[in-house]
Amino acid sequence: QVQLVESGGAFVQAGDSLRLSCAVSGGAFYIYTMGWFRQAPGKERDFVATISSTGGSTRYADSVKGRFTVSRDNAKNTVYLQMNSLKPEDTAVYYCAAGSRTGGIVTSVPNNYDYWGQGTQVTVSS
């Protein structure tokens, strides 16, 4: 079965940078739309970023635009989220997700994703 494993979460200071990774196994990574979502305590899971199967198209939530960059390496079956200029409001559990029914295009809709990782904690202190 398809498995997603996130890594890279940490406790950092405001203004710091982090890079999250999500390794995918057991599926056809090169056809998947990949997405990043996050969930803060007591809040719903929110869209962060998405990247098309080829990596040629990306989309971001307004709250992270200009600070976060999503990328992928199809040879390594891995998607990344580079997070710069982190703010306390970025504190959340970050999840990666893979969509196999999207035709490879970007999507911010959680229901369009079929597989989810277990999440990695990012805490940003002021």
Image (cartoon, rainbow, N blue to C red):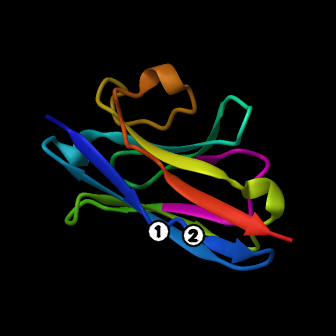
Residue located farthest toward the right when viewing the structure as drawn: 126
Q: What amino acid is labelled 1 in the image?
A: Gly
Determine the image quadrant of residue 40: top right
Tell me where residue 84 appears, x and y as whole percent: 69, 73
Residue 63 colored magenta? yes
- Nearer to us in this view, 6 or 72: 6
111, above or below 60, in the image: above
- Mark number displayed over residue 52: none
The span from disc 2 to disc 1 (Cα, nearest Å) is 6 Å
110, above or below 29, in the image: above
Determine the image quadrant of residue 105: top left
Q: What amino acid is labelled 2 in the image?
A: Ala
Label 2 secondary element: loop
Q: Is residue 5 visible?
A: yes
Q: In the displayed structure, does residue 43 sit left or right of residue 83?
A: right
75, above or below 58, in the image: below
**Crowdedness of circle 2 by 10 Å Cα count: few (<14), some, many (20+)?**
some
Q: Residue visible at 23% across and 43% down?
A: 3
**Crowdedness of circle 1 by 10 Å Cα count: few (<14), some, many (20+)?**
some
Query: Pointers 2 and 1 in contact (CB under 8 A)?
Result: yes
- Mark number displayed over residue 10: 2
44, above or below 49, in the image: above
Q: Residue visible at 58% across and 74% down?
A: 18
Label 1 secondary element: loop
What stretch of residues is rendered in magenta?
Answer: 58-70
Tell me where residue 67 appears, x and y as whole percent: 72, 66
- Mark number displayed over residue 8: 1
Tell me where residue 117 appears, x and y as whole percent: 37, 43
Q: Residue visible at 71% across and 44% down?
A: 61
Q: In the displayed structure, does residue 13 sit left or right of residue 36?
A: right
Q: Residue visible at 31% across and 60% down?
A: 78
Residue 47 colored magenta? no
